[in-house]
């Protein structure tokens, strides 16, 4: 197979900016240069975000339940103070980006947080950083109840030597995407959180949605005795949108007051109990999903990864019809897609083993290296840093992600039946394997393997 050319532009898209930083609901803040901030109690529209990026005004967005980026906020301090904090946290221009702010001697230091290789909730982010931030007189964003200025607006320039000549938000975001993750567990002064194994959930039931929520939001309660079910479906819908739990509770409470359509006697007679019921439903569902390490749609896509439609054809061809090899390459491409901008991605042996097995993963890696698809770095530190890998792949826009119910499909067994017919897959496999093997592989992917797993995860 010929060496695959990468298809990565050195600019980011507006959709990527929105996915990285924007929480549209339920409110946002805006200010003109030199004026005071004003809160607007309605959803944030793309047109306002574009004005921010064009430098016409500043927009501040609320945080999300699982934030993709965090920022240390320095106000009225010399640059030396920022440098001291970066050194203290082992932050540099490889894993963070320093931006100027509108005010003199003020800075925002952006990083992509993780905690023991998992995305942190906003609560965990704040819990970890709070003692350290307080000791240094700085703030960590996003926060639960305060909007934070979006990056790359007017006067928000890159200050690091490596990044300072980057102009335009499209290129600035691209270079931010190239930064390495920052492990929150290395922050001094915080209480250590034990990394328990997630509970085994019925993910199909937990993720399923039985009500047309957009229509429900427009029309209100559909009848008597529907409030309980509707509230819970709204909780699930807003969790999928990565909304903060507190904002989820507020949104449902405010929506119900305006859209009960006279169908809820409890709301009229015991409003406080109804509000407590909403809070209980939201807390239970959010905690349940967090305990099971099930993430909302965008964090699921960022952390677990995704595949695009053209990826599947390339995977089948590269694997030359071998089902184990197809599975391994699928997992590798899925993991690398959201990390495609980085120069190198550290991958621990345990990850490879989970994709293939302790006795076979090395053979798959050697095969990919022989094809010029994968390169492995030599530098690693036992127990601290895994070897980095670089995948040469024809990466596509994530707009082509294979989705089911708006959620990235995450196994080969789920993806293949969504993109191939049995006849097309069998014909493709026949170019590499025998008729009998092609038939068995096709039957497994369209029947046995497809039915043995939950489709919603």
Image (cartoon, grey):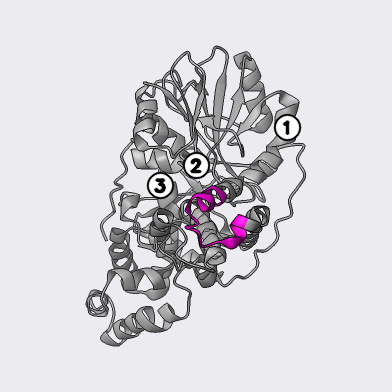
Residue 102 highlighted magenta (yes or no): no
Figure quadrant of residue 70? top right
Nearer-the-camera pick, 223 or 214 = 223
Q: Is label 2 in a helix, a strand or a loop?
A: loop
Most common secondary structure along the magenta stretch: helix
Q: Which of marks 2 and 3 is nearer the N terminus?
A: 2
Point out the frontmost of discs 1 and 2: 2
Residue drawn at point x = 45 percent, y = 38 percent: 42
Q: Left of 326 or right of it: where is 295? A: right
Q: Is label 3 in a helix, a strand or a loop?
A: loop
The answer to whether residue 387 is above or below residue 420 is above
Point out the frontmost of discs 2 and 3: 2
Figure quadrant of residue 215? bottom left
Q: Pointer 3 and pointer 1: residues touching (CB < 8 Å)? A: no
Question: Residue 308 in the image: x percent, y percent?
Answer: 33, 58
Question: Residue 352 in the image: x percent, y percent?
Answer: 52, 62
Q: Which of marks 3 and 1 is nearer the N terminus?
A: 1
Spatial CA span between label 3 and label 1: 32 Å
Q: Earlier in the sequence, mark 1 or mark 2?
A: 2
According to the picture, the residue beneath numbered tag 1 turns out to be: 132
Residue 342 seen in the figure: no
Q: Residue 26 carries which label?
A: 2
Spatial CA span between label 2 and label 3: 32 Å
The answer to whether residue 420 is above or below residue 70 is below
Which residue in the rendered view is the most extreme toward the bottom?
Answer: 436
The answer to whether residue 75 is above or below residue 191 is above
Figure quadrant of residue 86? top right
According to the picture, the residue beneath numbered tag 3 turns out to be: 340
Spatial CA span between label 1 and label 2: 30 Å
Q: Give the range drawn in magenta.
A: 251-268
Residue drawn at point x = 62 percent, y = 63 percent: 292
């Amino acid at each position: 197979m010929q060496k695959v050319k990468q298809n990565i532009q050195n600019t980011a898209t507006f959709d990527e900016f929105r996915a990285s930083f924007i929480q549209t609901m339920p409110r946002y803040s805006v200010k003109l240069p030199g004026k005071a901030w004003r809160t607007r109690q309605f959803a944030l529209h793309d047109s306002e975000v574009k004005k921010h990026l064009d430098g016409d005004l500043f927009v501040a967005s609320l945080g999300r339940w699982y934030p993709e980026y965090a920022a240390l906020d320095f106000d009225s301090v010399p640059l030396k103070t920022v440098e001291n904090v970066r050194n203290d946290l082992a932050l540099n221009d490889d894993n963070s980006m320093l931006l100027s702010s509108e005010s003199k001697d003020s800075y925002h230091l952006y990083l992509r947080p993780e905690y023991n290789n998992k995305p942190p909730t906003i609560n965990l982010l704040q819990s970890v950083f709070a003692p350290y931030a307080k000791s240094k007189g700085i703030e960590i964003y996003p926060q639960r109840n305060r909007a934070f200025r979006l990056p790359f607006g007017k006067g928000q320039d890159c200050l690091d030597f490596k990044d300072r000549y980057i102009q335009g938000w499209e290129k600035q975001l691209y270079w931010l995407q190239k930064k390495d993750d920052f492990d929150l567990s290395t922050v001094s002064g915080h209480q250590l959180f034990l990394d328990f194994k997630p509970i085994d959930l019925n993910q199909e039931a937990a993720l399923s949605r039985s009500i047309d929520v957009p229509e429900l939001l427009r029309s209100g309660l559909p009848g008597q005795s529907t409030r309980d079910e509707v509230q819970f479906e709204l909780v699930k819908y807003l969790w999928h949108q990565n909304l903060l739990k507190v904002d989820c509770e507020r949104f449902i409470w405010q929506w119900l007051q305006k859209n009960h359509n006279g169908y809820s006697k409890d709301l009229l007679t015991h409003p406080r109990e109804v509000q407590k019921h909403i809070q209980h439903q939201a807390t239970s569902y959010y905690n349940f999903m967090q305990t099971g390490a099930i993430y909302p749609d965008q964090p699921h896509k960022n952390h677990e990864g995704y595949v695009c439609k053209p990826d599947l054809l390339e995977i089948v061809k590269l694997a030359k019809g071998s089902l184990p090899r197809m599975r391994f390459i699928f997992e590798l491409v899925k993991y690398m897609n959201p990390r495609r901008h980085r120069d190198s991605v550290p991958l621990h042996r345990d990850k490879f083993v989970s994709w293939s097995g302790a006795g076979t993963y090395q053979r798959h890696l050697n095969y990919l290296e022989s094809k010029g698809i994968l390169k492995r770095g030599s530098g690693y530190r036992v127990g601290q840093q895994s070897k980095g890998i670089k995948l040469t792949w024809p990466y596509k826009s994530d707009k082509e992600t294979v989705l089911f119910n708006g959620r990235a499909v995450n196994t080969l067994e789920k993806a293949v039946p969504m993109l191939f017919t049995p006849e097309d897959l069998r014909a493709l496999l026949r170019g590499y394997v025998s008729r009998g093997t092609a038939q068995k592989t096709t039957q497994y992917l369209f029947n046995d393997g497809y039915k043995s797993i939950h489709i919603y995860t």
